[in-house]
Each structure stands twice: as structure tokens, then as C-alpha cells.
Amino acid sequence: MKDFGYTVIKQRTIDYDQFDGRLLSDVLRMEPSFKTCLSCGGCTATCSANDLVSFNIRRINLSLRRGETYELESEIQKCMLCGKCMLVCPRGINIRNVIMLIKKSILKYKSVQL
Amino acid sequence: MQNEGKQKIWKDYQKEIADDHYFYVRSCIRQNFFPGSEQTFLKILRAELNKDIFENPHHTTCSGIGYHSDIVPFDTIQTIVARQFALMTEAGYRNLAVSCITSFGIYNEIIETWKEFPNELEKIRNYLKKATGREFKIPQNVSHASDIIYKFREDIFARKKYSLTNHETGKPLKIVEHIGCHYAKMFPGKGVGGAEFPHVLVGMIESWGGEVIDYPERRHCCGFGFRQYLVMSNRGYSISNSKKKFESMEPYRPDAIASNCPGCPMFLDRWQYVIEEMEGKTYGQNGRGIPVLTYEEMAGLVLGYDPWDMGMQMHQTDVEPLLDKMGIEYNPDLKYAGKDGKQIGQVKMAGCKC
Amino acid sequence: MKHIVIIGGGIAGMESACALTDAGHWVTLIEKEAQLGGKLNQWSFLFPDFTPAEKIKDTLFDKCQERDFSILLKTEVKSVQTHQKKFNIETFGGQKLEADAVVVSSGYELFDARRKEEYGYKIYDHVITSADLEKLLRPGSDLSVAAGKNPKRIAFVHCVGSRDEKSGNHYCSKVCCITGVKQAIELKKRLPEAEIFCFYMDLRMYGKHFEELYREAQEKFDIQFIRGRLSEAAEKMDKSLLIKAEDTLSGRPLKMNVDLLVLLVGMEAGKGTATAAAKCSIEYEDSGFLKTNDTFLFSNFSSQEGIFLAGSCTAPMSVNDTILHARSAAMEVNSWLRKQ
Amino acid sequence: METTSFIWPFTIGLLFITSFLVVIISIWITSLSRIDKSRIVHSIFTRKSLMAIGEVFMESLLHRKIFRKNRMLGYMHMSLAFGWFLLIIVGHIEAWNYYHSFSVPAYKAIFFPYFVPASASTNSGKVLAASMDIILLFILSGVLLAYYKRLNSKLFGMKKTTKLKAGDRIALSSLWLIFPLRFLAESVSAGIHHNGSFLSQPCGQIFASLIPLQSIEAPVWWAYSCSLGLFFMALPVSRYMHIPVEVVLIFLRNYGIRVKKRIGGFSRIQVYSCSRCGICLDSCQMTHAAIKDTQSVYVLKHIRNRNLTDEKLFNCLLCGRCQPDCPVGLELNNLRITQRIESTKEYNSSYEYLKNGKVAISPQTEVIYFAGCMTHLTPSIIKSMKEIFKVANVKYWFMDEDKTACCGRPLMQVGQYGAAGKLIDHNLERILASGAKKLVVSCPICYKVFNEDYSMSGIRVQHHSEYLLELMAENRLPVNKMPLKVIYHDPCELGRGSGIYHQPRLLLDEYVELISVKNEKESAFCCGGSLANIKIHMNERNQIRDKAMDEYLSYQPEMLATACPLCKKTFAKSNNLPVHDIAEIVYMAIHKNKIMNPEEQKFMEKSKIGL
């Protein structure tokens, strides 16, 4: 393969038809309240971890919904589970359960891959 | 796909194309990329259509590439364009026939600017006068060269030697049309058929017996993008755009790609070779590339011009598969022969497994 | 007895005609179509509670039948002349009417989705408008996109022809958001296997029960809302559509294949209202909707004394807002006439 | 003698269950940690064993705790357990007395009336036979109650009763049959051999007048033996395993063994000691939200059956209300947490960002104030505390004023001890660096973890209710009693979790008129907002809260006081009573004229407080 000094760049586009929705369907099945997220960002604004490091719970919803699971595994580890987000959420989403379910599903699919 | 819908749009976007007496402005890059195309255009207009088309060797680049690469300021490009118009005015012409899509966009943009901001026009008249002593009139009609071919497509087909059909099966060839972004995306009214469903190449292809492929990434840019190509480390952006288009058109199994822009056929042609070298992937049939044509080359083939005379050996993706399908007779030995019959040497980076 | 001519026999015209008759006036209702009801005739079910449009229409029809006023169907106004505080109205049929007051209730027209060329309405086979879908939502209709194949993924595009400089309409059509939510739910009920997406810029759930319906759409019907305006649609070989948008909340471009694309078309003042404005010599706004004397207290008054405005000829309105506006128009006409 | 072959079902069952118990208990004991094993060795020949025997007698036989809860239920359990125990003992005495030997095989004692037709011929035999009849009568009354309880559990003070599985059904049926069959067998033998007493003899007579008893004597003893054998065989798969295992539990508990944060022999013993009496169902507030399958009894059952799902495991507030009621004294919260640790042990949490130096270094200080994450959502508590510090002239460092790591307790509640440890290490480092002597905490969740899991000797951790009381005792806080009827809501983590019931009440007594309610202190309600439950839905939380609120409202208070930001936020949301943290109440008393907000002002005016 020749090297021309540049390569074909991977598209930034989210290809909705390609993503692996296993994590998403697991989480939504076990915690249906998560469906009602409005992306208001209240959770992220109040987040104790977000005070200390860039950690965006609102984006976790989007990452799941767009199949961006590769970044989830490291992102989700930042959560301290303090629960402030749940007191702020206007839709009463059980966010801590979502975090725990994601952790569980990540493990589950890792072992499936093995 | 409902054709009536497209036809309605085509009806809505009909532009005026001058009938005769053109002042021809060439593209600066095409003469390197596809050197035979502009010659073919002049030949068709003069020899086949008996039109009066004039060019002045003193005309220069419109500086559009510099302008879009943020090197040439707007005042400068306006003055350069004013000078082209002055050459046209001095030659006694009022109809501009533009070879380049970028220039076509520039001319339209500047003329529209002058309509909106007459002060700007006065300023530029002043600049040109001071710099060169020249004066100019704004062209009555600005047509892209492909508009003119489009206008006379039936006359051309009347003189055809070949049509865009498979000579063995008689079936229409499937052709992807690619319109340069600056043709109508900036001013939909300035392009035949508007920006979303341009008719300029569709009209030619359908009139000449071919079938047009409308694939999902049809509207997408070829990837030239000026800076994306000019800076080598940015070329990944450029090639990714072309690749996106190839992947989208591949399932339709096109026989050729036709374009009306200087840059697009260049990149759609060259990047097929590069992708093959980098990833081993080809998009045409039988492991070969998809031949890429300029509309002049397409017209020339229909009229029976010799492909090597039109410079089609300069394509990096070989055009032979298309020639064979159309049943065009050509001498492979003369592919790389000069005008005097001597071999001028092959293209160093031979294209797409041919 | 005073005579009032109402131009436009949609729900605003019908409701104000009834109210003015009840107030003891003689009313003539002029409608260009062969039947009353206007745009409501095209609708199957109404947001936010899925009331059948028929039910509202029938009630209004009954109301009109019970009252004594004249209805001129298939009639268009040719001219309106003011003469000594009276309005002389001539129709194309040659009828001449003298009125003490005029109510313009000429309604709206749906945005012609073909103007949004990039969405390919009337070009791609499976791009339809919300009005087309409304007809498909009648019980027993066929929703399949190919023989025996129901759409598996459906996308709704909000703000088609609204809030869009490119369409020439800067305003919000108000009802499309909730229409989208309503139709998405109805589709999901009919096609439980389908995935449904709504591409929106903002969701404007301004009315009673609207927000609740939106939540229900998310929670019960798994309808997904993606914030981002569709840039374009393209048809694929299998007639499905490749759509592109930015997922603005992720800040990334997004593409997906859908089997059916529904364009939530907005409201425009339309030809009927433009004609009415011209004939009555009343002012209209840049948007094309008729100008009201002010926003708060005189929203039924036109720029000309004696000519009143009712319903969606003044601004995009829902069915219930239109009915209320029509009633208030009748009250304003009545008290104005008494002062004369 | 071939007719005695009926002893085999009983004997096999007895052998089976004895060896089964020996094996399984040995496994459990061997899997105890070394420290726990040495605890056994060091305690076995001490008073602790005697105390354990006493407890076994009081709890396993007499069921004192159940008696306290409900006499009827207590009597039922006592009659069965203690009665059966006496039956076995007196049966053996009969046999020893007759054979003049202590090495009589068990079956001879159990089936004594059959083997010794002339047993009632002596005086001692008569007395013993009469005792057996009394005991049998005692047990049968319990069995009757048990039958009746299945039909009507309300009588026994229980709103709910546990659901049964196959193993339990077999064991239960055989248990219910044992004593009626024993009675039948004894009566039949009495009818033939006239060796009965006041109960068995007349019944035997009646039977004899109805049917020829010779032919049915062996079959009824067969049935009796079978029911005993069946019960023993079904014991390992039934809830009646608690009968033998609880004895082991009582001994080990007396030796100081507790549930650790890992699954082991002792946690298994606890799980098997659950009698599934279902008393924990009654105190569980989850039932207020119609959640009826996640209570301790079910979780322990699922642990035994190895089919516990996260949905059940994590659907618990860990409020601890069930724990004081448990007749077996199981560590229900710890068992659940142990299971949560097991369930989440592979979850990853990395708090690398805590190490990047973004958090400011600690200033030197005497007193640290740590508001807690939740308190930041109830800023008036922080405002009040700041004001109180000012009034009392305390110099302090507000540790989490700007940004800080969570205390770690919420992670622990869901089993993430490892992850919590990282936060604890981080916070501990900051606390120790400050040189402080005292850590004042506004959130009971934080308080518990600082108190129990942070190793910081020399630093006193106080919840602000304790701290404020201390300030008051030192006359550093103005006192001003307001004529307000106030109910104090015990936060779970502060009350049952940390045993702090009195300090907040003593403090409040100085400022308001405190009224006491039925469910307070150990039996206080959970507000429903607990972070320990990650499965419960918001509307279910609201139902739990409303139920608690309803009870409070029935006392017509003018204000609800609490000492936890989460409780405050949870109750305040219900919007039918002003809810304030005790710090806010102290603040109000300090600033008679500066009440917190206009609504507050209106309310206070209404309550005729001099403004």
C-alpha cells in the first residue's frame, strides 16, 4: 500500500444504521424513565464530578442513543454516584440506575466478545 | 423517484443561455487536468454548431482559487474580473461563455454584488481604470460552457456517431452526473434546473441515450475544496469526500461519471487511483475504476472524436471500458503517441489495474 | 337588523356566523368551496386528545343548520366597496350584497413542501406531508411503502416551511410540533414495530396537555426526538431515504435510512387571505397574515373600520384557538354595531 | 418383629438430616475467616456459650421477640417449637425411665407408646403419659392456629404473609401432619393397649368403638414416621432449615462474629437462619409503593436459591426498618450490602481526575465544615450553618464550598466499596492535611461514612445536630423558643444508621414545641428519597413519602423538622407542610426578624410568631 502523506479520514458522521444498540436496549428496558430525557443538561450542571473533570451525563444519553459506546466505558467511571442529578432532573429519571446499568452492560458485552 | 416532480423543478429553473457570439474565458487548471476538453468545446461550437466564439489570449485567471483560499482579497478579484469583462467589451462581445465552474461562480457572485452594492461597482471601475486604463460593461449573459452544450444538445445528437448506450445490448449506459458546487449551490437561479436537481448534465445524458443515476450522495462535493487539496496534509479530507461519493454510487454500477467542473473530474478520477493504491479498493466493474468524463469529452465521444485526440489518455482511471461499451473504435497503440506518432511515454502512475 | 358578511366558511367563519346570528344579526357566509369546514375537512384526528375531526365538524355543521343565516357556497368575492359606512360586496356569480360589517375569516394554506426541494417531496416516492399522512391515518388505510411491507423506520421533519428564511417564512406555525407528536403516536399505534424519529429545532408544546403528550410519546411510544434540522434527503435504490442532519446535541453530523419521511408543513396566509386583503383593502404583515390593530386588545380589528378578522387569517392557530378567536370576533362586531 | 419396619422413614430421615447438618455447618464454619475462627476458639468455654444457650432457649424455643410483636403469633411459634422440644425430651424420659438406660435408640423414644404397650402401668409412666398428652394438646393448639393463620394472617398482626415454594410446601405439609398423626397414632395405641392418658385414652376408646383398631395401628404409626421422615428430608430445601441453623447463628453471634463485606460462611448461616416469617414485610415501606417482592425475606430466599436479580437486590431503601423487627436478629442491611458488593465487584470506577491537583490544598483549621453534595441543593442549610458559625464565632474551613469529591457513602450503599475507597482516600488526605480536630457534617449520609469508614483518629466527626447542641450547651447560641408545633423526622442514616436520636430532639426542644409521633426513632419512616435504592421510580418514592407525610399530618404539626438535606428535599416536594432542617430552625431563632422567604414570612405570621 502506497503512502501518499495523507490517509482517508474516518467520517465523523454518526451512521445510525451501523451502530450496536445492545447497550441502549438493555438500559432502556431496565430503566424506561431514561427514554424521557430532554437533554436539558440540569444533571450535568449540578454534577459533583463535573466540577472536577469534564463529565457530561447529558451526553451519556446521547452517546448511548447514537451507539458511541466506545467512549462510554471510560466516561462512566468518572461518576461518584452522589445522586444530585436525580434531584435536579425535571423528568425524574433514575440516573444512578442508568449509570449502574451501563456498567453492567459493558461488562456483559465484554464477556460476550471474549 | 417521481420524474414529474423533477420536471416541475426543471421548469421552474430555466435560465437564459445566449444563442451565439460568445466571449470564451478558459479555466486555468483544466488545461493541465484535461487539456483536450476546452479544445473540444471550441471545436464543437465552431465546427459542429457554427457559432461565433472568441477568446483573447490576454485573459488571465479569475483568481478564484486564490480567493477561495483566502489569499486574494475581494477587491483584487473584483478588479481582475473587471479586466476580463473589459477584454470582452473591447472585443465587442456581451455574452460570456465560462469554462470553469469556480469562475462561473465568481462572475455571478461579483455581478450580484454590484447589483446589490452599486458603490462597489463604481469603486472597481475606478480601480481598473487607474490600474490598466480599461473600461468595461457587465456581460448581458453569463453562461457556463456546459449550459451552451446543454442548449444545443439536440443539435449535437443530430450529428452523433455514437450514443450513450451499450452497443452490444442497446441498453442506455448508466451515468453519474456530478455538478460543480459553485455552479448553482450559491445562486440556484443561475443554473439549469437549480441547485437541488440540476438538469444541465441530466439533459445531455438523457438526450444522448444515457440513463442518469440519482444516488444518495449526488449533491455531495467531490472534495476539491481548495484548501483541502492545496495543502498536502489536508488531502485526507479531500479524498474522504470523494470516497463517500464512490461508496454511495457503487451499488448502482455506473458506467461513467460525467462532470461540468474543472476540479471535480480531476479528483473523482485521481482519487480512484489513490484509493486503489492505499486501500486496494476499486469501484467500477471487473475490478476497474469508473471512467470519469468532462461533458466536452462526453459530447466529443458522441460526435465520434478520437479519444486520444481529446486527451483522454491523461485520465488516471482508464476510459477504455467505457469506449468498449459504446463501441468506439480506437487504437490502443496510439494511446500514448504524440501528434507526430512517436510514443511520448506512459503516465507514471498507471491507473486502476488497467 | 344589521347585515354582516363573513368571507370564508372554515371553522372561524362558521363559529362567528353562529355567534352573530345568536346576537340577532343577519349573516351571510361566503365560501369558495362546495362545502363548509375549510381545512378541517382534511384532518382525521385532532391533537392533543385524538378527537375525531368529524366530531368537531359535525357539531359545527349542526350548529349552523339550527340557525337561520344564508350560506353562499362555491362563491368568491369579486369586490368590496365602502360606501357611507356600508360595504357593497359583489361576488363573481354577480350577486350584490350590502353589509354593515364584514368579517374576514379566509384562513390559511399549507406550505407547499415542494418548495423545500432538498427534501424531495413529490420527487421521492416515500416523502409525504403531515396532511398526506393525516389521510393515511384514517382507520383501515394502507400504510405500506411496498407490497406487503410496512415502514420500519419513519422520520418526521419539524418546521418545514416555518422558521425558515429559505422558505420565506420567518414565523413559527405553532401547531406542527404537537401535530408531529400526535401523528408519531398514531403511527406507532398502527405500526408497533416501527422506529419513529422526530427531527426538531425546538419543541414548542405551548398548549394544554401538549407537554404531557410529548412525554407520553417518549415514554410509552418510544418515539425518539433528535434536535437538528434535516439538511437533505436522498432516495436510495430500494426507495428508502437517506437523510442527513446534525445531531446538534452531540455536535456531530448524523445520517440514517428511513422508509418514510413525513414533512410537518407549516401554515401560510395563502392566496385566499391575500385576495381577501386586496379586495377589502386591509393591511397585512410581512408574513402575509392579516394585520390586527394590536396584539392584545384588538386582535379582531383590521386596519379598516368595520372589517373584522377571525381565525388563522391573522396568524397560525390551532382549532380551539380559532374557535375562540372567531367567538371574540363576533363579540367585537356586535358591540361595534351597537355603537354605530 | 416385622411390624416395626415403620421406624425406617423416621430413622433414615434423622440420619440424613443429622449428617447433612454436620457437613454443611462444618463447611460454613471452616470458611469463616481466621479471626472469626479464633473468636470461636477463645469464646467457646466462656460465659458467652451460656448466654448463647439462654438465647437459644428464649428465642428459638420460646420466641420471645415474636411474642413482643404479637402474642398470638408468639404463642403459635412457641407451642410448635417449645412443644415439640418438650415432646422429644419427655418422650426420651419415658423411654429412659422404662428401659432404665440412657442408650435407648431414638426411635424407641419417638414411637414409645407403640413399643411399650404397658407404659402407663406404673405411676411414673402415668405421669409421663399425662405430660405427653398435655404437650400434645399444647402443640395441637399451635397447629390449629397455624392452619388458621394461613387463612387469616391479620389476626397475627401481619398484613402480609410470605409466598411458598415446593420445598416449603412439602416441609410445611409434613410439619402440619406430624402432630395430628402423632395424636392419632397415640390414641389408636391407647384404644388397643389402654396406655393413654386423659386425652389419648378417651379418643382411643371412641375410635375403638367405631373401627377395629388392630388393623390400623401399624399404618398410623407408619404415617407418623413418614411425616417425620419427609419433614427431615425436605428440611434442607425448606425454610425450616432455620430451626437448626439459627442455633448455630446464636452461638456465633454471641462469639462476636458479624457479617463482613463479603459472602462467606457466616453470611450463609444468616441466610439459612431466615425463617421467612415475613415480619419484615410489615415494616417495609416499599409496600406503600406497591413493591412487594424485594423485601429482605425474599432477597434472602433468592440468595439461598441463587436466583437473585439486581432488580430485587437494589430495590431497597436500606432504611433498616425491618432489622429491629427480625425475630432472628439477622443483619438484613449488611447481608444486602454484601450481596450488592458481590453483584458489582467487577464494575470499574476510576477517579484519576482527583489526582490532577485541581482541588485546592487544605488550609490549616480547627473545625472543618462539610456540607455534602445534597446540601448544595438546599442552600438555606448552608446559609444557616454559615450564620451559626458566625454567631458562635467559630473559625472553620468550608471544605466543599466550591468543589469536592463525594464522601463515598452513596457508592457504598450500592456495593461499590472499592470505588468509595478512592474517594475516601482523597478526602481523608485533605482532611488530615488541615490539622483539624473536628469535622462538622450537614448530611447524615456523609456523617455515617466519615464516622465509620474514615480512619482519622483525633478528629471528632459530628453531625451538625450534635454540634449545634454542643454550641448551645456552651451558651454560644441564642435560644428563643418559637410557639410552633413541630415533628422531627429521623433521617435513616442518622437515626437507625448512626444511633443519633436524642441530640436533634434536645436541640429542637429549645427552639420549638416538639411533638412525638408513633413511628419515630427506631421505627421512624424513611422519607423515600434514599440513595440506597437505585431501582425505585420517582413516583414510587413519592408514594412512600406521601404515606409518611400522611401520618405526620395527622398530628397537625405546623412544621416538619429534619436533619438531612435529602429528607428535606423529598418532603418539601410534597408541598403540604413547611419542611426545615434543624440548622434552618436555629437560624430562624437567631434572626427573629429575618425570615427566609416571603412564604415563610406569611407562614410565621400565621403561626403568631412575634416578628
Image: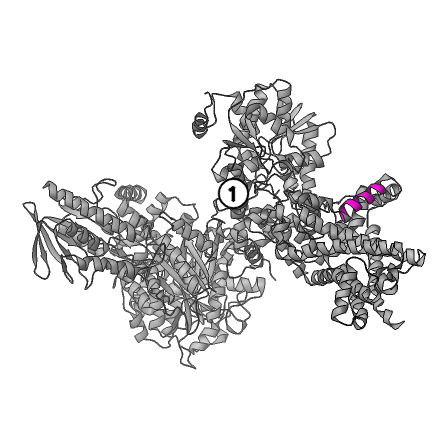
Residue B232 spot, x, y in % from top left: 53, 52
Quadrant, the C terminus of chain C: top left
Secondary structure at badge 1 equals helix
Residue pictured at 54% horizontal, 28% vertical = D584
Q: Nearer the viewer, residue B263 or C108?
A: C108
Main SS, magenta residues: helix
Near mark 1 (Cα within 10 A), the count class, few <14, some 14-19 or many ≥20, is many
Q: Does the magenta stretch include residue D55?
A: yes
Q: Which chain carries label 1?
A: D
- Answer above or below: position of C208 versus B275: above
Residue C38 spot, x, y in % from top left: 23, 59
Along the horizontal axis of the image, is D399 left or right of C38? right
Q: Which of C133 and D553 is in front in this view?
A: D553
Residue pictured at 24% horizontal, 47% vertical = C286
Report how many numbered discs are placed on residues in the image: 1
Q: Which of D554 and B263 is in front in this view?
A: D554
Identify the residue at the far left of this view: C84
- Answer above or below: position of C118 versus D521: below
- Magenta segment range? D50-60
Along the horizontal axis of the image, is B180 left or right of D36? left
User: Mark 1 is on which residue type?
Assistant: Asp
Residue D448 spot, x, y in % from top left: 67, 36
Residue B203 spot, x, y in % from top left: 33, 68
Res. D505 visible in picture: yes
Q: Name the residue under label 1.
A: D546
Identify the residue at the far right of this view: D100
